[in-house]
Structure formats: structure tokens, C-alpha cells
Amino acid sequence: MTEKLLEVKNLAVSFSAQGGEVQAVRGVSFHVSKGETIAVVGESGCGKSVTAQSIMRLIPEPPGKIKGGSIHFNGRDLAALSEKEMQKIRGKEIGMIFQDPMTSLNPTLTVGDQITEGLLTHQDISKADAEKEAVDLLRLVGFADPEARLKLYPHQFSGGMRQRIVIAMALVCKPSLIIADEPTTALDVTIQAQIMELFKEIQEKTGVAIILITHDLGVVAQAADRINVMYAGEIIESGTVKEIFYDTQHPYTQGLLASVPRLDGDRSKPLIPIYGSPPDLYSPPAGCAFAQRCEYAMEVCSKYAPPVTYLSGQHQTMCWLQDERAAGMRGPKVTIK
Ligand code: SF4
């Protein structure tokens, strides 16, 4: 079995607000093995970015707070580390890529200064050697003339190029894990595909593990090994890409898939939206959080939280339909050929 690099168990994160406490992440568990790419997918507000920020301990405290659970990374529980200890891990052992490259890049510094900054901070290295490494990294992320690019400023690059630079910055200290939070959302579709291809290439060349956070299931189909689907602060289905796309079990995952445009699909048929809104996480429902929007909801669904059902070694869901006590109650599946 592949060695686990990161293991998140029962993570619970809340935010204090005027109306009470928002339970943004409610008992999330998943793992990432060395050299693996996993995706965390769900709509806005489902808790995927809060989960990513909790791993990096970037949740502003207050109002946020990790209320429970553990985040084991390379043998240490990140949830229990001090800010000083986390500073040695951020950027060095875990790299982070954010949605908008312009907010990650400093417009007043050259790209070279920004890429070498991480090396000069975390390693005992001369400026000349740091620049050599920066040149190698720019070449790795696809720049043909890296020496010249080092001297340029962020505004002299296109959006896709800036995201490549941010990826180079995340790789600079050779981390074993990169967390990419909506890395392609600000980019157009062609560039999105190039960036996802780049993640695959980088992983093959460096062996880094990657967590891709996205609202778009279509984006991760080619890049991820496994997918965790989040809804209302919980992982409601997880499995290999094949299991999630071709053996979809949870009605919410089915809804997500039905709402994704497909190039090889019947374009005369309209995309099917998921009607309704997610529940209020000030007071999450006692039963299934998707019950108000689910066309297969049964009486039990609103009363009792669905248990986790294990369908295979990797595939699991949180839905009463897959519980053995609901045999014969299965809803129709989305069929994707
Ligand atoms: Fe729908 Fe019930 Fe499954 Fe929730 S537990 S997704 S309401 S069938």
C-alpha cells in the first residue's frame, strides 16, 4: 500500500459570527498518499477551501477555529502546531497555489525576486544559486527563455503565464505536497486545460502530491487519482475518478455531473441544474444536509444523518440509498457513456 503523506481525520472548523457559529467543516476525513493527486470538489460554501486553509493553518483565528479532529502530515499533527512551527512547514514542505495569480504575486517585485524569496528564506543558499534554481523552475513550468523572464514584473505576463509562475513559486522548496485552491478558475478554458496538463507533468517529474480544490468536476477528470465530493461541510462521496464518474452513487454527485457541459454529450439537451440552496450551516439539519434538494429523499433522510457506506476499498458515500437497510430504494443513476 502506498504510504500516506497527509491524513485528515474528523476535521471540524467553525466561524463565530453575529448570528452564532457557522459550522463550515463538519467531520471531514480523507488522506493523500505520496505522489498522488486528489481532488476536493463542491459548490461555493461547501467547506472545501476552509479545509485547505485549515491544513495550512491559514484560518483567521478568531473568528475561525479548528474545533476538532487531526491533520497528520509526515508524522506531525498540524492542528496542534504553534504558528512558529507552521511557518517552517508552509512553503517549504507544503506549497499553496491560490485562485487568482495576481493576488499571490507582488506587482512591485520582479518574478525572479519572488521565486528566489522562498529559497533564500528556507535554505542556506547564495543568491546566484537561488537564481539558477529559479531558472530551472521556470523551464519546468514551460517557459522557453527563463533567464530573460526572471527580470520581468508580473504585469508583463498573461494570466496563464502568471499562474505558471505561481506554480513555480509553490515548487521552489521542493515540497512533498501542493494544495491548489481553484487554480484555474480565473483562467479561460484553453489555459485551464494547459495548467491541468502542467500539474500532471510536474507530478511525473517531481513526485509531489497534489490536492486540487475546485467547484468544477470536469477540470479534475484527467488530473486526479481520487475525488472527494463535499457538500455542506461534509464529504458525501469519495472514490477513484472512475468510480465517481462511472459508478456515481450519491444524488448530489449525480447532480454535479449532470450540470457539467460535455463536449461528447448531446448538445441539444439542456444542462440540468441542482435546484434549491445548501442548508444554513448556523444550524445544520439533523438528517441529510441534501434532503431539501434531493429528488430521492425518503422520510428517514430528514430525521437521521446518513451513515457512511463502503462500496469498495476506495468508494464510499453518505446517503441512505446505499445503506443495506434501504435495499430496493435506489434512485436512477446518471448514465455517462
Ligand atoms: Fe437524498 Fe436521502 Fe441520500 Fe440525502 S440520504 S442524498 S436525502 S436519498
Image: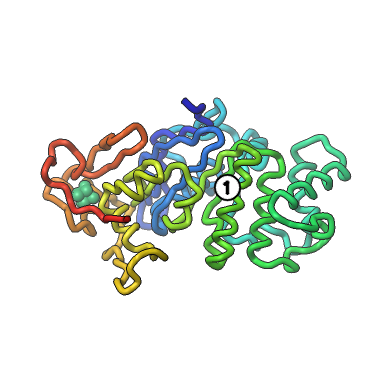
Q: Is residue 223 left or right of residue 331?
A: right
Q: Residues within 10 Å of mark 1 (few under 14, many from 20)?
A: some
Q: Position of residue 284 (x, y in %)?
A: 28, 50
Q: Is residue 334 visible?
A: yes
Q: Is residue 83 visible?
A: no
Q: Is residue 204 left or right of residue 237?
A: right
Tell me the residue at 79%/55% (across/down): 146
Q: Position of residue 103 (x, y in %)?
A: 64, 61
Q: Quadrant of residue 306?
A: top left
The vertical placement of 247 against 123, above or below, is below
The vertical placement of 72 against 220, above or below, is above
Tell me the residue at 48%/46% (across/down): 224
Tell me the residue at 53%/49% (across/down): 60
Scheme by which the image is coloured = rainbow
Q: Which residue is mark 1?
A: 200
Q: Report the front residue among 253 and 318.
A: 253
Q: Residue furthest bottom?
A: 268
Q: Position of residue 64 (x, y in %)?
A: 47, 47
Tell me the residue at 73%/68% (across/down): 155
Q: Is residue 34 left or right of residue 279?
A: right
What is the count of numbered marks?
Answer: 1
The vertical placement of 230 against 2, above or below, is below
* Residue type, numbered disc 1: Lys
Tell me: is circle 1 under 8 Å from ligand 1. no
Q: Quadrant of residue 45?
A: bottom left
Q: Report the front residue among 90 and 148.
A: 148
Q: Position of residue 96 (x, y in %)?
A: 60, 47
Q: Report the front residue among 335 and 169.
A: 335
Say which quadrant the C terminus sits in: bottom left
Q: Tag 1, which secondary structure?
A: helix
